Each structure stands twice: as C-alpha cells, then as structure tokens.
Amino acid sequence: MLIRRRPSHPIQPSAITQPETFAQRRQLLKAAMATGIGLSTNLAHALVKPQGDGTLIPNRIDTPHGDGLTLTAYENITRYNNFYEFGTGKRDPFRYAHTLQTRPWVVKVDGECEAPGEIGIEDILRHIPQEERIYRFRCVEAWAMNVPWNGFSLMTLLKRFKPTSKAKYVAFETLFDPEQMPGQKRSVLDWPYREGLRMDEAMHPLTMLATGVYGTELPNQNGAPLRLVVPWKYGFKSIKSIVHIRFTDKMPGTTWQQMAPDEYGFYANVNPQVDHPRWSQQQHRMLGDSFFARKQDTLMFNGYAEAVADLYRGMDLHQFY
Ligand code: MTE
C-alpha cells in the first residue's frame, strides 16, 4: 500500500484458470450431488488447481449472489496479494505464506457482550452454513477483482456472543506470531494488523467472513483460515487471519488509519468522488486485464449503493473517508 507501483501482471494467460472452469466445476458438483454420485475429492481438486491444500469447503450453499459478474481467475486472486506479514511485495504472500499454521485455529470474542468466549475454525466450518457469493473486491490502488468467496455473514457469528447495547463498534486483530509470519519481525506496520467496523456495518448481511475461495478453503496468502470481506469498502478493511474480535463502545484504531491518517480513513468506503491524496479513485482496472485494456469507472460504494447507502445517510463522506 505504501509504495505505488503499476501492477506488472506476472501471470501468463496460459496459466490462468478460466472462469468457465469454475462454472463447469459448480455444475459438475451439482450434477454429482443430484444423481447421488460421489465426485472424488481429487477430481474436484484437479478442476480448480488450488494453491491452498485444496480442501473443499463443507456445508456449502450455492447462492445466486453476484451471478453475472465476470470472475477473476483463481491464479490472479491467489498470486497477487497484500499481506505484509509475509512481505511487502505483491508476490511475497504466495511465495512465503506456507509458514502459517491454520490448524488448530481459535478466534477469541470478547468486550461489550454477554457471552464472551472462543470458537475454533473446525466448529465454524462444520456448523455454520457456508454460502458461495461472488463479490466485487476493489483495492485502494485502483485494481479490482470479482471473487467467488465462500463464507457466511459476520452477524451470524457475532450474534452468538450476544453483544450488549454498549457495543458500538467491532475491532478485529490478525494473529501476531513472527515465527509463522516473518514479516512481523520488521516494523513496516504496527503489528498485529488491526481493523474495525461500526456495529451496523458489521451486522449488515453483505459483510462476510470468508473461509474459502472458488469452493476450496482459503489459501494462506488470502488470509486463511478466516478473513473479513466488506464488498463496498476498499480492500485494506478486509483483515486476514483473524484471531480476536472485540465489541467496543469506542471507534477502534485501525492499522492504515494510524499509519497514514490523511490517506486512509476508518470508513474506507469505495467512493469515486473522494480521491486518495496521491491518486484518483475514479477508475480501476480489473486484475488480469492487459495494461492497455480500457479502465472501468468506479461506482459509488463499489456498486453496492442500493444495499448500503442508508448506513451513511447525512454523513459528509469527504470528511469521513
Ligand atoms: N490483513 C493483514 N493481516 N495484513 C495485510 O497486510 N492487507 C490488506 C487486506 N488485509 C492486509 C490484510 C490489504 S491492503 C488488501 S488490498 C487486502 O488484504 C488484499 O487481499 P487479497 O490479497 O486477498 O487480495
């Protein structure tokens, strides 16, 4: 995020899983389930060639959410990342995130709630139905992706811990373990990575905790085993590898806002009318497109205005960026 570089897409077109492959896999899995024929896990893996270990997400519900968006190739979603815990280069997370151990994995939930406690990722995967939703995901540096995430509405998890009326915000933290996340040995950020949402944003049905992508468990570089996705906000709100969720009555400090408050706000809503001080936010390029491809106009709230604009009614979005 700090250094502005033009993406030099290192992925050769020949290496890209075409979106049709995903659609075919969806259909194959559906057909196999409908006829009662078990599809061998290996075959399903081969169809998506994942860089995670390829474990299929259990308990999946196929939703039409986002159907019609042209999917970004799996290889682009998983090889061009921001995850400073593994280095500041876009290719570093794909190369180095294998040192992260995602089992066992426990998320602690506390603060302003009646039932603080812990929940393991296995319980989440087994007991919370995982929806497949295609969301547009836009980073602040003007590239965007259409990602088929698997996961569930954050509110499903939050409600279990019974937030009280004092809970006005939700704060999130990534794991801090410099042995597993060697980037944390350098002070490029104030570790651990922190993010936050206002309570109504956190309880909005579009706000998702993602556990997978393209039907398989999240690869480490994308924030395994659990990461936030808020489709109407810039990508840096999507905190990865979450271990701590806290309900609070005060707006929590967040990593990028603390690093560069003039450049990154708490709200971080995608807004073509509010430029980043060093670049325009009016247009973006889809990840994987050629450098010469026409840029697309960025939409208010990333195209989700109908669903979320009410959350910000009456607020000056130039002030609360
Ligand atoms: N979460 C943690 N823990 N560390 C990070 O460096 N980078 C953020 C966000 N979540 C980051 C993080 C930024 S700047 C972006 S744009 C997105 O993750 C990138 O998500 P992706 O790599 O899955 O595309």
Image (tube, grey):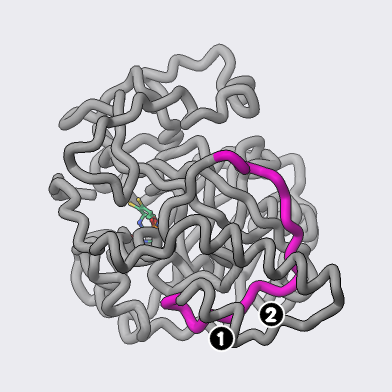
Element type at marker 1?
loop
x, y (%) of residue 153? 69, 51
Q: Which residue is mark 2?
A: 122
Q: Considering the image in quadrants, where does the C terminus appear?
A: top left
Q: Quadrant of residue 89?
A: bottom left
Residue at 37% across / 43% down in the picture? Answer: 144
Q: Quadrant of residue 88?
A: bottom left
Residue 57 on the magenta span: yes
Is ligand 1 less than 8 Å from the beta carbon at label 2?
Answer: no
x, y (%) of residue 294? 26, 31
x, y (%) of residue 281? 29, 28
Q: Nearer the viewer, residue 10 or 310?
A: 10
Q: Is residue 73 above or below residue 145?
A: below
Residue 113 horizontal side relative to residue 80, left or right: right
Under mark 1, the amino acid is Arg
Q: Nearer the viewer, residue 304 or 203?
A: 304
The number of numbered badges drawn on the structure is: 2
Nearest to N terminus: mark 1 or mark 2 = 1
Q: Nearer the viewer, residue 20 or 120?
A: 20
Extreme residue in the top direction: 314
Residue 284 horizontal side relative to residue 299, left or right: left
Residue at 71% across / 62% down in the picture? Answer: 130
Q: Residues within 10 Å of mark 1 (few under 14, many from 20)?
A: few
Q: Which residue is mark 1?
A: 103
User: Marks 1 and 2: CB-CB under 8 Å?
Assistant: yes
x, y (%) of residue 218? 51, 70
Residue at 41% across / 58% down in the picture? Answer: 73
The span picked out in magenta is 50-68
Element type at marker 2?
helix
- The chief SS type of the magenta part is loop
Q: Is residue 202 above or below residue 245?
A: above
